[in-house]
Image: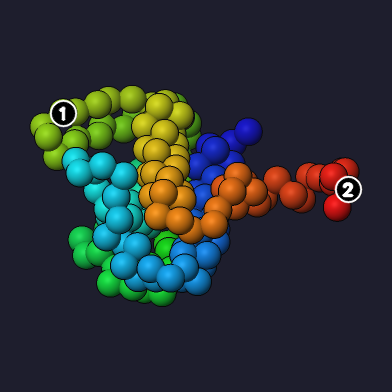
């Protein structure tokens, strides 16, 4: 599996999942108010989870393929705006050719806002940082929506699996 398959393709799939979750959220009685919901007082609300999810793939692609990306600092005011922002990130990712990816053993240095610094190869960056962080925020967004009463199930988190289905339960 290539670095592209492990990162860009996964991001596109995850953002598609997020779009599906937000579509269901739009139909919920709380609607846009869901953007303020959070799991715990010391955690970020849904709107920040979504911003992180729309920024992280572009930030990773900048390291992995050298394509420029400007992260958003603002949070969306509506679920529709959030879906539009996600769509822009997906379009950015779709424009990245697999041939643009740097070698997996290319060293990258990652500085965190808290002053920590990490030096690792790109394949380590994807495996140990980029994907775990992306899935953390995607799972958190799912959990926030679920805790607020949006009717979601596991099938909403892994809808891509249905393309592999060879047998379905009887109705």
- Depth check: give the residue in front, 84 or 115: 84
Which x, y percent locates residue 60? Answer: 38, 45
Residue 59 visible in the snapshot? no
Look at the numbered disc 1 and give the secondary structure of its residue.
loop
Q: Which mark is residue 42?
A: none
Residue placed furthest toward the left: 115
**N-terminal-most mark, 2 or 1:** 1
The quarter in which the N terminus is drawn is top right
Which x, y percent locates residue 147? Answer: 41, 49
Which x, y percent locates residue 52? Answer: 32, 51
To which quarter of the image does residue 116 belong?
A: top left
Above or below, 37 against 26 in this view is above
Answer few, some or many: residues within 10 Å of disc 1's Cα (few below 14, many 20 plus, some between 14 and 19). Answer: few
Above or below, 96 against 116 in this view is below
Give the foreground label among 2 and 1: 2
Which residue appears at 19% of the width and 28% of the height? 117
Look at the numbered disc 2 and give the secondary structure of its residue.
loop
Q: Which mark is residue 170?
A: 2
Which residue appears at 31% of the width and 67% of the height? 33
Residue 50 visible in the snapshot? yes
- Depth check: give the residue in front, 158 or 12: 158
Q: How many marks?
A: 2
Cα–Cα gap, marks 2 and 1: 53 Å
Which residue appears at 55% of the width and 61% of the height? 20
Which x, y percent locates residue 105? Answer: 44, 27
Which residue appears at 35% of the width and 62% of the height? 34
Asked whether, in this view, residue 116 is left or right of residue 90, the answer is left
Q: Which mark is residue 116?
A: 1
């Amino acid at each position: 599996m290539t670095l592209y398959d492990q990162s860009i393709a996964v991001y596109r799939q995850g953002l598609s999942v997020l779009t599906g979750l937000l579509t269901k959220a739009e139909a919920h009685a709380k609607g846009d108010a869901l953007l303020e919901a959070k799991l715990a007082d010391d955690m970020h609300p849904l709107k920040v989870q979504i911003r992180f999810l729309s920024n992280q793939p572009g930030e990773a692609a900048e390291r992995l393929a050298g394509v420029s990306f400007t992260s958003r600092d603002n949070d969306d005011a509506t679920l529709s705006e959030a879906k539009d922002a996600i769509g822009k990130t997906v379009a950015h990712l779709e424009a990245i050719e697999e041939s643009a990816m740097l070698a997996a053993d290319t060293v990258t240095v990652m500085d965190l806002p808290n002053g920590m610094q990490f030096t690792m190869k790109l394949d380590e960056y994807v495996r140990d940082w980029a994907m775990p962080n992306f899935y953390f925020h995607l799972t958190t967004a799912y959990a926030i929506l679920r805790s607020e009463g949006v009717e979601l199930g596991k099938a909403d988190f892994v809808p891509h699996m249905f393309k592999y289905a060879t047998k379905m339960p009887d109705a």
